[in-house]
Amino acid sequence: MGASILTARNLSKVVPSAEGELTILHELSLELNKGDSLAIVGASGSGKSTLLGLLAGLDLPSGGEVVLAGQALSTLDEDQRARVRAEHVGFVFQSFQLLDSLNALENVMLPLELDGRKDARARATELLERVGLGRRLSHSPRQLSGGEQQRVAIARAFAAEPDVLFADEPTGNLDSHTGERISDLLFELNQERGTTLVLVTHDERLAHRCRRLIRLEAGLLVAPLEP
Ligand SMILES: Nc1ncnc2c1ncn2[C@@H]1O[C@H](COP(=O)(O)OP(=O)(O)O)[C@@H](O)[C@H]1O
Ligand SMILES: [Mg+2]
């Protein structure tokens, strides 16, 4: 039995719509331990990104609660939630979301500098070497391929040594070979550092490498797969 790092209890999200209230997530519960890996799968529009946003404290639920690294997120204000995220969470998005005005090294250094770390440059360099981009430090995102940009995004997400890495379709914009390399990298870092992975994905191979998998259908959890 490992230590719990992320718990969701009866999580719901209801949004207003022209036809009245729309439930986009219904009473979902799950618990993850340190070092776990979870795949969230389901058709487009089934609520995957909504769930990820709630678990990461980017959005607040209409009902239920999320406990991340021992903190009940709904009891915190926006600044406090931002601090929990900065301390415990990393993100990787389908669209990479790197800053074009910064080179690869600077993109990875940014969260470390914001965190006041004196070793930002050395640590960012080491991470980029780790993801195979030691010779691309001064390249701008525009000069990098999609796979290289996603590796920079992963280095950036791992920079602050998060307890949980959230990724929304991290291989979605990549060819299958490059996607496989990105998956390898995520699981290497998961094994080496015990980082918990929470991945939204359409990529069957990536999903099945995770220790646990949940499937959403119209905001309902339909297939929990226990370890
Ligand atoms: N803020 C919102 N307001 C209204 N509808 C939303 C909002 N966010 C998401 N939705 C709707 O909720 C459903 C689930 O969205 P989403 O979580 O993005 O699905 P997925 O990531 O699985 O494709 C979709 O039908 C989407 O249009
Ligand atoms: Mg989505």
Image (cartoon, rainbow, N blue to C red):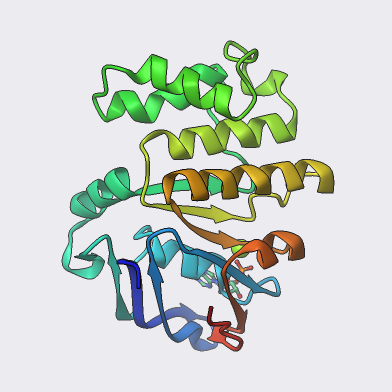
Q: Quadrant of ligand 1?
A: bottom right
Foreground pick, 117 / 107: 117
Q: Residue at x 58, y 30 (%)?
A: 152
The residue sitting at 72% across, 52% down in the picture is 172
Q: Does residue 88 appear left or right of residue 121 in this picture?
A: left
Q: Quadrant of residue 113?
A: top left
In the image, residue 112 sits, relative to residue 137, either above or below, namely below
Q: Which residue occupies the foreground of this view, 48 or 161?
A: 161
Q: Residue 16 at x, y = what percent?
A: 45, 79
Q: In which quarter of the image is the N terminus?
A: bottom left
136 sits to left or right of 81: right
Residue at 36%, 76% (x, y): give it.
Answer: 8
Within the image, what quadrant is residue 209 found in? bottom right
Residue 189 is situated, as x and y percent measured from the top left of the image, at 52, 43
The percent coordinates of residue 78 (x first, y second) are: 23, 54
Above or below: residue 1 compared with residue 37: below
- Residue 222 appearing in the image: yes
